[in-house]
Structures are given as structure tokens and as C-alpha cells.
Image (cartoon, rainbow, N blue to C red):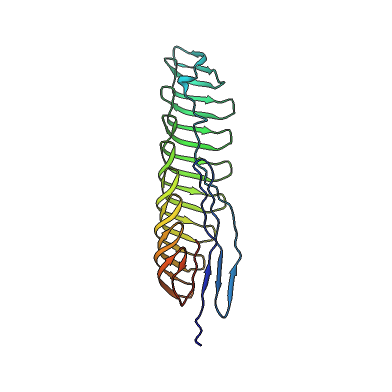
């Protein structure tokens, strides 16, 4: 009875557990290649990846409902101090009793904003240091991040790029502390649109993203030089695609949940 050569390729599933406020989890590469004559096994290096989403409302005070208890301004240069009922202290330019111009607002928690104000709102260029030691420096509008900016998380992750209405929107770069990097489009704080994801092990994905998942048309070049190119859905190959292994063997056809639909070869890509 004729025996078919059997090829198995495995990758540890690349998962998302994104929540709107805080955490999302991505796990890394697991590669297992098996044939009738030999087996190659690369030890996985699992890790939890946090892509923090902004939660700003607790920091940015509505000053219309937080009246000052004390205010003074020099009549010549309009520089003075405003003390608010909740303990916030503002020092800087004051116009008609409002924070307006350059100034610094310090919170009881130790957080502070330093930069431009427009009629009691963070508006223009400034820096916000959170009590958690996260740092944002860039443009604000109506008390939220809006425009180009750089956000450095206390744990080491960094985002630099566009913001709109307090969220990552537009183009940007997100660098993870362990060395992975995403470059591309963002929508409502998520990887969404065209982008590139660079894994620290050398694997590169280039293509479409939707809600932090690989979704659409993409190409993944693995660190062993094998390549998958085709349709993705739910972070896995789904639809028509082509896989070229490190020896140059090509498998073209239908993929379902990361599995090549063929009777002659079993290929499983879970990322």
C-alpha cells in the first residue's frame, strides 16, 4: 500500500483577550515540523502581551463642576495660582479666572499636566504624568489626546503616533517591552487596517488587521524562512492561501482554521 509523506507544521495560537479598558493577550510562536524521516522541534517561548488601552476620564477634571476655592493672578502678566475644592492646584497663566495659556496642574495623587490650556481645558501641546508613572507627551484637544503624541507605559511599552478623541487613531508604532513591534494603522485604540507586526524571533506578518487580529489578506514570513500568503480570519489562515515550507515545497489551496484542506498533506498553522 502506497504511503503518503506526511508533513505537520504547528504554531502556538496567537490569541487576543482585548478588553476596552486594559489588557489584551498575545502569545508567541510554537513551531513543530515532522516528516516520516525526521522531526524538528523549536522550544516555544510563551509570554503574555499587554496592549493597554487609555482610561483618561478619572484624570481629566470637569472644572465647571469643581469650582476653585482660591484664585490669584498678577494683574501685569496674568500669572497666578488656582486651588480647587478637590485639592488640584494650578500654577500658570490665568485669564478671567480661567486656566488659559501655559501652566501646570498638579493632582493630589501626584499626577500632573504641564503645557497649554484653553479656557480651563488641556488644549495644545503638553505632557501628562500619571500617578502610575505612565507618560504622555503630545497634543491635546478638549482634555483628551488628539494629534501626534508619544505614550510611554511605566512597564516599558511605547506608542508613538496619531490620536483622535483620546484614542489611538491613524498611523502609529507600538513597541512591546520584549521586542515585538507593530507599525501601521490604528482605529479606536486597536490594530486595524494595513500594518506590519515584527516578532522578536524574526517572524514578520504584513497585511490586514481588524480589531487587533490578523483579518483579510496577509503574508507571514516565519523565522525559518517558510512563508504563508493568503486569506486570514480570526487570526488564522482561513480561505485561499499558499504555504511554502523551508525546503521550497509549495501547498496551495483552501485553509480552514489554520489547517490546509488536503488528503495528501497535513499542515496546521495556528498563528
**Vertical position of residue 268 compared to residue 48: above or below:** below
Asked whether 263 or 233 is in front, the reply is 263
Total marks shown come to 0
Q: Nearer the viewer, residue 134 or 169?
A: 169
Name the residue: 59% across, 44% down: 155
Horizontal side of residue 148 vs 90, given as left or right:
left
Please, which residue is most extreme toward the top here?
A: 75
Identified at 54% across, 29% down, the residue is 112
Residue 242: image x %, image y %? 41, 69
Residue appearing at x 51%, y 21% in the figure: 91
Q: Say above or below: 148 vs 89.
A: below
Q: Position of residue 15 (x, y in %)?
A: 52, 55
- Judge whether 18 appears above or below 249 on screen: above
Q: Quadrant of residue 196?
A: bottom left
Q: Residue at x 44, y 74 (%)?
A: 262
Taking 109 as reference, is 237 above or below it? below
Q: Nearer the viewer, residue 191 or 259?
A: 259
Picture coordinates of residue 1, whole percent (x, y): 51, 88
Quadrant in which residue 34 is drawn: bottom right
Residue 67's spot in the image, x, y percent?
A: 49, 17
User: Which one is in front, 246 or 51?
Assistant: 51
Q: Please, which residue is most extreme toward the bottom here? A: 1
Amino acid at each position: 500500500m502506497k504511503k503518503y509523506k506526511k508533513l505537520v507544521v504547528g504554531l502556538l495560537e496567537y490569541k487576543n483577550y482585548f478588553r476596552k479598558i486594559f489588557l489584551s493577550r498575545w502569545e508567541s510562536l510554537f513551531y513543530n515540523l515532522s516528516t516520516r524521516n525526521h522531526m524538528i522541534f523549536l522550544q516555544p517561548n510563551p509570554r503574555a502581551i499587554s496592549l493597554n488601552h487609555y482610561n483618561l476620564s478619572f484624570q481629566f477634571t470637569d472644572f465647571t463642576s469643581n469650582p476653585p476655592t482660591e484664585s490669584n493672578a498678577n494683574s501685569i502678566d496674568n500669572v497666578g495660582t488656582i486651588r480647587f475644592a478637590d485639592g488640584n492646584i494650578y500654577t500658570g497663566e490665568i485669564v478671567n479666572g480661567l486656566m488659559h495659556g501655559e501652566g501646570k496642574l498638579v493632582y493630589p495623587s501626584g499626577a500632573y499636566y504641564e503645557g497649554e490650556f484653553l479656557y480651563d481645558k488641556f488644549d495644545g501641546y503638553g505632557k501628562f504624568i500619571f500617578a502610575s508613572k505612565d507618560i504622555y507627551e503630545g497634543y491635546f484637544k478638549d482634555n483628551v489626546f488628539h494629534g501626534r503624541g508619544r505614550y510611554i507605559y511605566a512597564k516599558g511599552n511605547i506608542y508613538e503616533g496619531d490620536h483622535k478623541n483620546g484614542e489611538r487613531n491613524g498611523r502609529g508604532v507600538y513597541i512591546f517591552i520584549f521586542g515585538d513591534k507593530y507599525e501601521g494603522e490604528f482605529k479606536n485604540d486597536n490594530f486595524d487596517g494595513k500594518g506590519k507586526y515584527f516578532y522578536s524571533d524574526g517572524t514578520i506578518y504584513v497585511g490586514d488587521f481588524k480589531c487587533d487580529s490578523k483579518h483579510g489578506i496577509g503574508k507571514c514570513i516565519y523565522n525559518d524562512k517558510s512563508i504563508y500568503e493568503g486569506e486570514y480570519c480570526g487570526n488564522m489562515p482561513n480561505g485561499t492561501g499558499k504555504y511554502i515550507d523551508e525546503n521550497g515545497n509549495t501547498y496551495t489551496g483552501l485553509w480552514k482554521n489554520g489547517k490546509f484542506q488536503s488528503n495528501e498533506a497535513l499542515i496546521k498553522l495556528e498563528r
